[in-house]
Image (cartoon, helix red, strand yellow):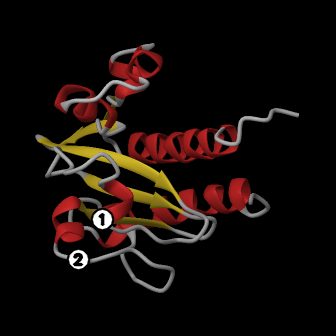
Amino acid sequence: MNKNKWVPGVIKGRIAETIVEQLFISMGFQVFKYGMENSIPGIADLLKGVRGDVSKNIRQMPDFVVFKDKEAHFIEVKYRKSGKLDLKDIENYGDYPFTNALFVLVTPKHIKCISYKELKEDKKIHEKCRNWLGNRKEFETCKELIREYCEYALKFFENVD
């Protein structure tokens, strides 16, 4: 058995990213992997113990850039069994530099979304909030597809700790 406690979290995060990536592709977006792991492969190990603005900004790179209808969005994907996301979850390394990013939260039951601006206004995602991804003006035309992908999330995460 692997004794690295972070491994299950990495796996859950990758599954959530894959679900969101495929969802955006299905909605007709061009999806580009952008995060640290994709833009600068291998740098994660090099950044261990490194401090400073550059390393901080690299660690905070959103997972994707998505394009459709001449609009682009930074997308950061998070998985939380609890269904909760707030500003302190985002600013682990200090102020978040991608101020126009959207955070897509995948839970065992829902796919929700909140902007960094809303987080800065002390808004949060919690289990009972109605921050559905399909309610965002940027994505509201795709509610049926989003519901379909919520079912995929349910299948993958229903028995996961």
- Along the viewing direction, whichever of 40 and 102 lies nearer the viewer: 40
Residue under label 1, please give it: 87
Q: Position of residue 152 (x, y in %)?
A: 64, 55
Residue 153 x/y as whole percent: 62, 57
Could you say which quadrant of the image residue 53 lies in?
top left
Residue corresponding to mark 2 = 122
- Amino acid type, mark 2: Asp
Q: Relative to residue 136, is residue 41 depicted above or below?
A: above
Amino acid under disc 1: Leu
Q: In the displayed image of the protein, which residue is found farthest to the bottom?
A: 128
Q: Quadrant of residue 114?
A: bottom left
Classify residue 96 as left or right of residue 8: left
Give left or right: position of 22 versus 68. Answer: right
Where residue 108 appears, as percent x and y from the top left, is 63, 65
Q: Residue furthest left?
A: 70
Q: Is residue 96 left or right of residue 85?
A: left
Q: Which residue occupies the foreground of this view, 31 or 112?
A: 112
Question: Residue at image x 45%, y 78%?
Answer: 126
